[in-house]
Image (spheres, rainbow, N blue to C red):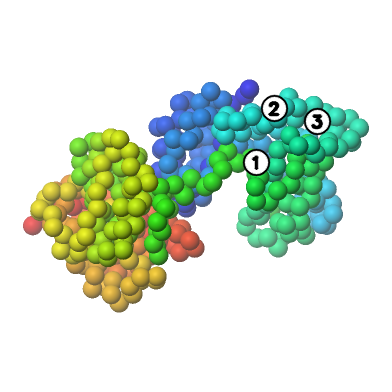
Amino acid sequence: MTDIEVYSTIVTGFEGIGASEVSRKIPNAKNVAAGRGFVRFAVEPENLSKIEDLRSVDNLFVVIYENTIIGLREMQKEEAIATIKDQISFMNWKNAIEAWQIAHKRPIYGGSQKIVEQMRKFMKDGTPSEVSETSPSFRVTCKRAGDKSVHQFSSMDAAWHFGAHINNVFGWKVDMKKFDIEVYLRIEKDSVSVMMALNGESMFKRNIVAYGPTTMRSTVCYCMTALADPKPGEIVVDTMCGGGSIPIEGAHAFRGVAFFGGDNHPLALQRCHSNWKENELNGAFCDFFLWSAVCLPLKSNSIDAIITDMPFGKKLGSVMDNRILYPKLLEEWKRVLRIGGRLVLLTHDRRSIDAAILKDRENWRTDSTHMVNMGGLTCLCIRLTNIKCE
């Protein structure tokens, strides 16, 4: 079995963190590259199971096929669909099934050898494979990137016809909800790629069982925590933790670091304790408190890092409130952070945070900024260091 080409999706703005995590956690990862909203790499089959250790990425796929079909944009609907369907024999289904079996830790009936035999038979005489009780279920999802008007067909057209062709060739059962295999068809201009999902449920759904109004993805929590670069023995705090997403993810990902979270709403604390109860691990330390973020019950110079998702002024609070709140928060964080302590913030209200930092610029050094896509909102994730030039 040759190296497996893996394509992973990640929240836009955190691609560099994802690429760094892949290089660090996947033994002998090759050709690690990041682009807008994705990180891709090649991995040896014996190391593929390590992908489940990745915490920054949302979804993982094995790449089956990539090619440019000259003139796809100019083709009429029927010709374009037929051309896409014809590519099925050039796709590495054997590699895909073997990768799927490793990632999902269970076999597909007949394995990759049956897939090869079915493809040979279909290419020889066009005989379709019959659906049986042992056939895996599948669905096809099509995404067309960029300007969709350049094509004469819709994403639904492409997914439906390509899925029907897979059904004919392999005899897999179509099931849009309870599927074993998800085939992902991606089309951009004349470029076509086909992938197979290596994870079931999206990886950002871990940790949380009690959701609040602004619960953050676990993958985003990891990326923010990685930006703070916590070390064993350090204390890290989320002063406005909501349901505890950041401290819980941090406690899982960075062992030996003490994570604390706090919020001023009793219901938020209930969600924190419910979520931690479901995810508590030996060797991971995490606890939660009821407090005000502008008057923390913490000693001065006692905290190594603060990581928090600030009020956006969208679902909670308002932009006018933020203009008053943000400077107060920075003043309190400056007090409790040690010199050299790191502050990682996420907010949609860039104007308010920029004004607050500018007002106290002699005490903060900007280390990095990331423009992050959060549910369609372009948000700022910024890392600051407390230099306390008092």
Residue at x 31%, y 63% (from the top left corner): 267
Residue at x 32%, y 69% (from the top left corner): 351
Q: Count neighbours of disc 2 (C-alpha within 10 A) and say few if under 14, some if 14 to 19, many if 20 or more.
A: few
Q: Is residue 362 above or below residue 93?
A: below
> Which residue, given by chain and number where applicable, does mark 2 sit on?
111
Would you identify the image quadrant in which residue 86 lies?
top right
Q: Nearer the viewer, residue 350 or 214?
A: 214
> Which residue, given by chain and number where applicable, does mark 3 sit on?
118
Give how far apart the Cα atoms at labels 1 and 2 are: 14 Å
Q: Earlier in the sequence, mark 2 or mark 3?
A: 2
Would you identify the image quadrant in which residue 156 lies?
bottom right
Residue 191 in view (yes/no): no
Q: Count neighbours of disc 3 (C-alpha within 10 A) and say few if under 14, some if 14 to 19, many if 20 or more.
A: some
Q: Residue furthest left?
A: 390
Q: Earlier in the sequence, mark 3 or mark 1?
A: 3
Quadrant holding the N terminus: top right
Helix, strand or loop at disc 3?
Answer: helix
> Are the residues at dot 2 and dot 3 in contact (C-beta closer than 8 Å)?
no
Residue 72 in the image, given as x and y percentages of width and height: 76, 51
Q: Amino acid at mark 2?
A: Gly
Q: How many marks?
A: 3
Q: Residue furthest right?
A: 125
Residue 182 in the image, given as x and y percentages of width and height: 65, 44
Residue 192 in the image, given as x and y percentages of width and height: 69, 46
Q: Earlier in the sequence, mark 1 or mark 2?
A: 2
> Which residue, given by chain and number where applicable, does mark 1 sit on?
180
Helix, strand or loop at disc 2?
Answer: helix
Residue at x 51%, y 26% (from the top left corner): 47
Q: Amino acid at mark 1?
A: Asp
Q: Nearer the viewer, residue 188 or 102?
A: 102
